[in-house]
Image (cartoon, grey):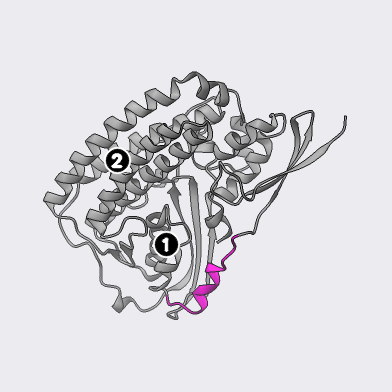
Amino acid sequence: MRKTVIPFGPQHPVLPEPIHLKLTVEDERITEVIPALGYVHRGLERLADVRDFHQMIQVVERVCGICSVIHALCYCQGVEELMGVEVPPRARFLRVMWSELHRIQSHLLWLGLFADSFGFESLFMQFWRVRERIMDISEATTGNRVIVSVNVVGGVRRNPDAEQLRWLLTQLDWVEEEVQRLEATMLEDYTVKKRTVGKGVLTSEKAYELGAVGPVLRASGVAQDTRQTNYAAYGELHFEPVVETDGDCYARSKVRFRETLASVDLIRRAINRLPDGEVRAKVKSKGNPQGETVNRVEQPRGELLYYLKGKGEKNLDRVRIRTPTFANIPPLLVMLPGMYLSDVPVVTLSIDPCISCTER
């Protein structure tokens, strides 16, 4: 049978990310997939040569605007380990709160795009309407909507008062109610099930073997989440990962719905257990970063890894970042063969690719 090579991306009406796949097709079915990356490389890691370790916080926040808090958290935790800085307990709980707010808005962004990929534009707008409320919460508590610049070496910049936190909890009640309503609307829809159930299946064995992370891994039945390492204050909040077992596009969307609601619950617990005290430790007396460290946190898309190396100078000797999409591209290449060409946008979108942070 004659083979045809069809390019998918880097520009596509469904996917906002510039991912490029070379698809080999036989009779409308995919037989081989070859990815091509590098369209939006910015060289951010190289800036460590000219920016000191404090200034690099603003750089790493711009690796990915959607989860800027979590990039800054991972970086700051690494620097704090190199310098022997102990973060105040209140700051650790606030870091959890802002991290989970970013997780919620990232998942709502993806759920909206996922709905749009089926042609459900009204549902897309409903998801983004709820996301706007989360962005308003971020602005009210940090001063910014997207890149909030709240993490610093030694803690956080902002310290919400009791009145702000009470208001935040009332807003979360509304968000939870709306997400539950939209979950029932979307996951019970015939068209959604027709396009997602049994599509892009990734077995638990393949997910583990290929190094999948985040919702892609947990939707295949592997209960692995970096928050289980108890960084920040997660160890005091009794966190449990969200897991589904079917490993298809439907399971991956279900994991993200459930994680959104789980994040709401984590924020409530963090606020209810928020200790009093300072939110920022003094670091000037600690000198400059010295040594090597690897720090891991859980982004909305999966495990984020930072390797930092310092030589006792104000500029770090090396900053190396591995983002979750980089780990999830090999599993994508296993999901697509055997699928119809028309399934490619939905299956590709199901891994929630973020190419700008993958290529940095």
x then y, percent, for residue 266? 29, 40
Residue at figure coordinates x 55%, y 30% from the top left: 249
Left or right of residue 258: residue 331: right
Q: Looking at the picture, how far across and down is residue 223, in whole percent?
A: 47, 34
In-front residue for pair 106/124? 124
Residue for point 33% across, 53% down:
232
Task: Please report the bounds of the magenta region as a residue range.
Answer: 40-52
- Residue at the spot x=40%, y=40% of the render? 108
In terms of image quadrants, where is residue 258?
Answer: top left
Q: Residues within 10 Å of mark 2 (few under 14, many from 20)?
A: many
Task: Identify the image quadrant of the C terminus.
Answer: bottom right
Front position among marks 1 and 2: 1
Q: Is residue 201 above or below residue 319?
A: above
Amino acid tagged 2: Leu
Query: What is the secondary structure assignment of the residue under circle 1?
Result: helix
Q: Decide: is 271 above or below 191.
A: below
User: Helix, strand or loop at disc 2?
Assistant: helix
Label 1 or label 2, whichever comes before in sequence order = 1
Residue that carries the numbered disc 2 in the rendered image: 266
Percent of width and height locating residue 169: 20, 41
Inter-mark Cα distance, 1 to 2: 23 Å
Determine the residue positioned at 56% across, 41% down. Answer: 14
Q: Is residue 75 above or below residue 83?
A: above
The front one of 80 and 178 is: 178
Residue that badge 1 annotates: 61
Report the label total.
Answer: 2
Q: Quadrant of residue 5?
A: top right
10 Å crowding of disc 1: few (<14), some (14-19), many (20+)? many
Residue 233 seen in this snapshot: no
